[in-house]
Image: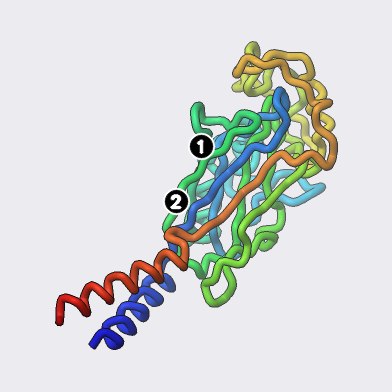
Amino acid sequence: MLRTTLAALALAAAASNAAAVNVRVTVENLSPENSVTLAPFRFGFGQGLFDSFNNQETAPLLGQSDIADAPIVTIAEGGSGSNWFPAFEAAEPDADLGSVLGPAINPFLPGQSSSTVIDIDPTNRYFTFATMVVPSNDHFLGNDNPMAYEVFDTNGNLILDQITQNASAIWDAGSETQDPANAAFLAVGTNANRVDENDVVRFDFAGLSAFDGLETAAGYNFDHDLLSSDTPVLRVSFSVVPEPATLALGVLGVAVLAGRRRR
């Protein structure tokens, strides 16, 4: 009877895992002190169909009427997922979407980390993300290839446990001119004000030099010279909750308890 119970519970656990998996998504700002802060981290697990931008192309409107409202621009200029999430859902209605906020205030200051646990369908194998880099007018981190990060294989197994990006991966959305008076996360200035740049999305962490020496909203003076092209600025980690080994022990414990009770 014990063997039968154990087998049944193992099968039930496997079926449950195939249907849904709890995944912990951990975000770490690896940037040096007094350099870049990361806005709330927006992400989705999907089929690799949602493509919110492409290198060397104007940010796509994806149903919006103005460049300021383009999904990737709402993240790049203000850190908001208000248009990015609906655009993701329109492209992939069954995608699993979420955000990770900083541990104290919404942004992630240099050295800070935080995590969230999300219930996902493991057939949503690909991970897409975007987060504003501040201080800036329209800089961000994100993947322009929606199939760049395959987190699960076709059998639902976790095959990617982390993503690390360096400063060279920081994008300029090409949507707003560089102007500290209109930038986000500075002690002075109005982020809601903007002037169209009419340019393309491109890699450009050097453009952050426009904010050198200025006081941030967190009270430190920004210094982009602390960053080089190979300076790590972001790590995203994935783990299944509970861990497979923990789940197996839990199943075994329940089975043994059931066997003892029957005796």
Crowd tier of the residue under label 1, counting other residues whose Cα lies within 10 Å: few below 14, some 14–19, many 20 or above? some
Percent x, y for residue 119?
A: 42, 58
* Label 1 SS: loop
Q: How many marks?
A: 2
Say which residue label 1 marks: 101
Q: Identify which residue is drawn at 36% across, 73% down.
A: 13
Q: Is residue 201 left or right of residue 107?
A: right
- Judge whether 62 appears above or below 231 on screen: below
In the rendered image, the vertical position of residue 108 relative to residue 129, given as above or below: above
Image coordinates of residue 92 in percent, x first then y, are 52, 61
The kind of residue on which mark 1 rests is: Leu
Q: How is the image coloured?
A: rainbow
Is residue 93 at least partly visible in the picture? no
**Whole-percent x, y for residue 123 in the image:** 51, 70
User: Which residue is under mark 2?
Assistant: 117
Could you tell me which residue is drawn at 69 percent across and 25 percent down? 135
Report the residue at 78% width, 27% height from top: 208
Relative horizontal placement of residue 157, taking residue 179 as reference (left or right): left
What secondary structure is found at the residue carrying circle 2? strand
